[in-house]
Amino acid sequence: MLKDFIRPHILTLESYTSARDEFSGSADVYLDANENWMDFSQEGKNRYPDPHCTLLRREIERVMGFRMENTVIGNGSDELIDMLIRIFAVPGKDSVLIERPTYGEYKVFAEINDVSVINVPLTEDLDLDVVAIKKAIDEHSPKIVFICSPNNPTGRSYDAEKIREIASYNPSLTVIDEAYADFDPSFVSAYTLFSENERIAVLRTFSKYWALASSRLGILIASDTVIRAVNKIKAPYNVSLSAQRDGLKALGEIGERKEVLEKILSEKKRLTESLSRFPFVRKVYPSDANFILIKVDDADGLYRYLMEKGIIIRNRSREPLLENSLRITIGSREENDRLLEALCEREESTVS
Ligand code: PMP
């Protein structure tokens, strides 16, 4: 049972009960939380926010279909990654498993928590190496297996059947980070595996498709066992009132978000085609996300050149399998034009 993988002191922990937990109905006079009675903001900012983001979670269920009983909102999905590691992995003793290359925070949060990291390389074509992952699970018994799909920085989403195979093999928690899933209209979420496997947890974020990176809103979708544990350890007011309102507003503007998605997808196609034509671009990897990974002749040189032109991309060349690779976020049409113009100028100057 998944419960057996949770650190015992978390299971028995008596968590803090906030004023808003002790009384959650509605009343006329609140003298319970030592707040300032004066609301300078005139929007209720003098009061602590709902610790459980109830309205936001209800709206998430309506719009995204994730049952509200199975969600917790984090201060970005980064906070949720950190909390999951702290719930399952004993510092100085346990490990988590990641594939390389992938999103850097799984490793960093594990290391902050003194939890070791088992690295399993992706295959040459940047796919999951299911055999190697299963072998590493047997050898190291990691407390969490992280799978990022679509993967950052490769842009590739993995076959749902492979994820299912790993998650059913792994006796502990498998976390599927779907931060970029909304950019792939044909994406099959690991949430569909949820009813058959309590050891699956899914992460989503408002930072990408929903265009709210500054609000810090991440969603964990998980079984009751995990949700209960996260609610035990999370700081009571981890998501501000403004952030909760931002999330609610965004969910009401789904039409606008879809319009921008169409633009991002058509710009991704245009950029992919245009980038492939430069002789110094060796490869443009297919992407299911809102960024493209390219392999070039001289990634460091190109990165520096673009920076001097005021265009910042991400140099991922130090990652395993990604020698001379650059990650480029799909910007607005104008921003992408700036990038392509700068690359044309460089090409012309090396030819002449
Ligand atoms: N997961 C992945 C795969 C990411 O790329 C990022 C941010 N770049 C995050 C999680 C963190 O998202 P958030 O802003 O919700 O903390």
Image: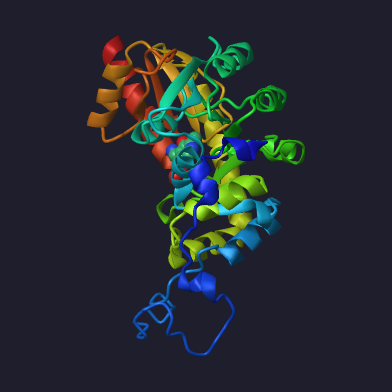
Q: Residue 39: give x, y in percent of width and height.
A: 37, 83
Residue drawn 48% across the image and 66% down it: 17
Q: Residue furthest bottom?
A: 28
Horizontal and vertical percent for residue 302?
30, 20
Which of the 4 image quadrants contains residue 199?
Answer: top right
Q: Is residue 296 above or below residue 114?
A: above
The spot of residue 26 in percent (x, y) is: 57, 82
Left or right of 9, for residue 181: right
Can see residue 218? no
Quarter of the image where the N terminus is located: top right
Quarter of the figure with the C terminus: top left
Residue drawn 36% across the image and 10% down it: 297
Instruction: Report how many numbered discs are placed on residues in the image.
Output: 0
Left or right: 55, with 31 as reference point: right
Res 132 seen here: yes
Q: Is residue 105 left or right of residue 222?
A: left
Q: Is residue 24 above or below residue 188?
A: below
Name the one closer to the observer, 304 or 103: 103
Which residue occupies the foreground of this view, 344 or 82?
Answer: 82
Chosen colour scheme: rainbow
Q: Residue 348 in the image: state x and y as whole percent.
A: 31, 17
Q: Nearer the viewer, residue 211 or 216?
A: 216
As drawn, 162 above or below 16: above
Which residue, as the protein is rendered here, is positioned at the far left?
308
In depth, the one of 29 and 92 nearer the eye is: 92
What residue appears at the point 30 percent right and 10 percent down from the top-left corner? 351
